[in-house]
Image (spheres, helix red, strand yellow):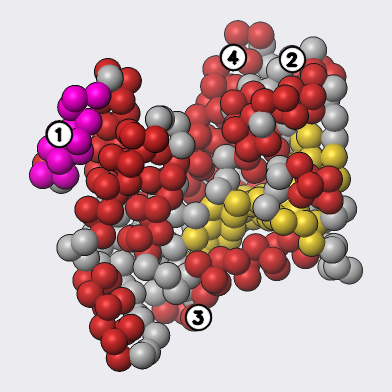
Amino acid sequence: MAVLMGRLLRACGARALDQDSACRITAAYLKAAQPRAGIGAPRGAGAAAARRYSSESKDELRVRYLHGEDAGIVVVEINRPKAKNSISKNLVKLMFEAVDDIKKNNKVRSVVLCSLVPGVFCAGADLKERAKMPQSEVGPFVSKARALITELGNLPVPVIAAIDGAALGGGLEMALACDIRIASNSAKLGLVETKLAIIPGAGGTQRLPRVIGVSLAKELIFAARVVDGQEAGRLGLVNRCVEQNKSGDAAYLEALELAREINPQGPIAIRMAKLAINQGIEVDLSTGLAIEEACYAQVIPTKDRLEGLAAFKEKRRPNFRGE
């Protein structure tokens, strides 16, 4: 890592201060992105079991580590049917725990974030809980929710949001932090906070313009406009829109298929590609290319790279192990 950091800083040393800072940040990210050895999903009969949370409301979030051919895929399911999956203190706590577990697990290759509640992805903040909250607690809670959504976006593996219903306010902000968004045509998406005389507070004012452009983001936020899945696809708000099925999980099934496409690719390469894109898009091209070089340097000494070359030569499917 010291060699990589030196290489990165040398590549950026003659550039502007903000570029140099970006390089240092990237080096820190590269260090943080390394999975911890020896920590993985449980094996055997209980491999798909969700973590046993201590909270009485543990069923509000279910985490499934898939196994068999789908090993490496984690499905995170929000389950607050009486509150339309709104974001409460307890849900934030459970999601922080789930994200932390995923981040530590070097067997995870992709994450699908979805809902177990028909017709709803996440309706935003829990306004009933918010109404009882003292004014002094509102700011800290919003900051914690913002930090959670940032952590979700910073997971080192691809995160796919499967939007089979309403994703409003903080729910859409959660989806915007994901790498890929798939929606059903019946889904409803919008940052509607201005209807309540507030603004998006969990990253919406920053991530939406980066996804669909500044002018369109302003229009949607200023007007508190809600769009369906088809319109979201046209705007580029979601990667793709699929026809909803009778069971109401078309977006989830599509997201699962995409996770299965990602699964056989080189896991270290996927992590480094995500890091290079996420860090590079925030800086100028010259600094971005230095970031790419630093990330590429991480895949050169891997066993997976040699396995890929051997598999190509032998005309067989590679067996990548994340080493």
User: Left or right: 253 with respect to 308?
Assistant: right
User: Left or right: 194 with respect to 292?
Assistant: right
Magenta stretch holds residue 254:
no
Instruction: Tell me residue 22's x, y (percent).
Output: 32, 28
Characterize the local packing of mark 4: few (<14), some (14-19) or many (20 or more) Cα atoms within 10 angstroms.
few
Note whether 290 is above or below 18 in the view shown: below
Tell me the quadrant of the picture where the N terminus can be found: top left
Query: Label 3 sits on what residue type?
Result: Glu
Query: Label 4 sits on what residue type?
Result: Gly
Q: Which residue is mark 4?
A: 139
Where is residue 4, by image quadrant?
A: top left
Tell me the magenta residue range. Answer: 3-15
The mark closer to the camera, 1 or 2, is: 1
Residue at horizontal 45%, vertical 31%? 282
Q: What is the distance, in whole Å, between disc 4 and disc 3 at their CAs?
A: 44 Å
Magenta stretch holds residue 14:
yes
| SS at mark 1 in the image | helix
In terms of sequence position, does the residue under pointer 2 or pointer 3 come before the other?
A: 3
Q: Main secondary structure of the magenta part?
A: helix
